[in-house]
Image (cartoon, rainbow, N blue to C red):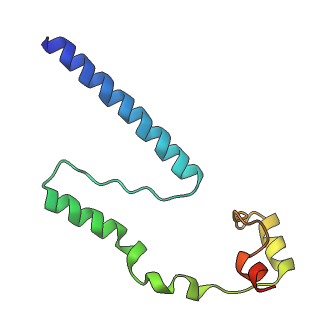
Amino acid sequence: FEERTRSSLIEAFEEQNNSLSTIQDVLSELQITCHTIPAGRKVDVVLYSLEKSLSRYFINRNGLLSKCTPIDFPTAKKLLDHGYKQLSRFGYWCPVKLQDQ
């Protein structure tokens, strides 16, 4: 019984580890930052580590878009062609400008 339980736990661990690796690969392809938090410590320490690593995404959240600099279409096209940034899900068009038109 003990050997069977151990093998099933090892199998479940390997399956979850493979799933986690797949998710991390997808996130890295999408250029989404992954944070690793050691969860083997006390809950309070883990929560503090999590809050500390994610705090930069929540501090000054209201000002994220206030630092954008508008550029003209030819400059944007040149930057995209040189691989500076990827196209957004909206392509070249800004949905706000389309709504205004």
Work out whether residue 97 or residue 10 is closer to the camera in this orientation and state it. 97
Q: In this view, does 97 lie to the left or right of 32?
A: right
Query: Which of the 4 quarters of the picture holds residue 8?
Result: top left
Quadrant, the N terminus: top left
Q: In this view, does 87 lie to the left or right of 31?
A: right
Q: Where is residue 85 in the image (x, y as percent from the top left)?
A: 70, 67
Name the residue at 50% across, 86% down: 63
Q: Is residue 29 left or right of residue 92?
A: left
Name the residue at 41% across, 40% down: 20
Q: Position of residue 49 (x, y in %)?
A: 25, 63
Q: Examine the rendered structure and indicate whether residue 5 appears above or below residue 99.
A: above
Name the residue at 54% across, 46% down: 26
Tally the marks. 0
Question: Extreme right residue here?
Answer: 74
Work out whether residue 9 or residue 76 is closer to the camera in this orientation and state it. 9
Q: Position of residue 41 (x, y in %)?
A: 15, 52
Q: Examine the rendered structure and indicate whether residue 15 appears above or below residue 75.
A: above
Query: Which of the 4 quarters of the picture holds residue 90?
Result: bottom right
Q: Examine the rendered structure and indicate whether residue 78 appears above or below residue 38.
A: below
Quadrant, the C terminus: bottom right
Name the residue at 43% across, 36% down: 19
Q: Where is residue 22 in the image (x, y as percent from the top left)?
A: 49, 39
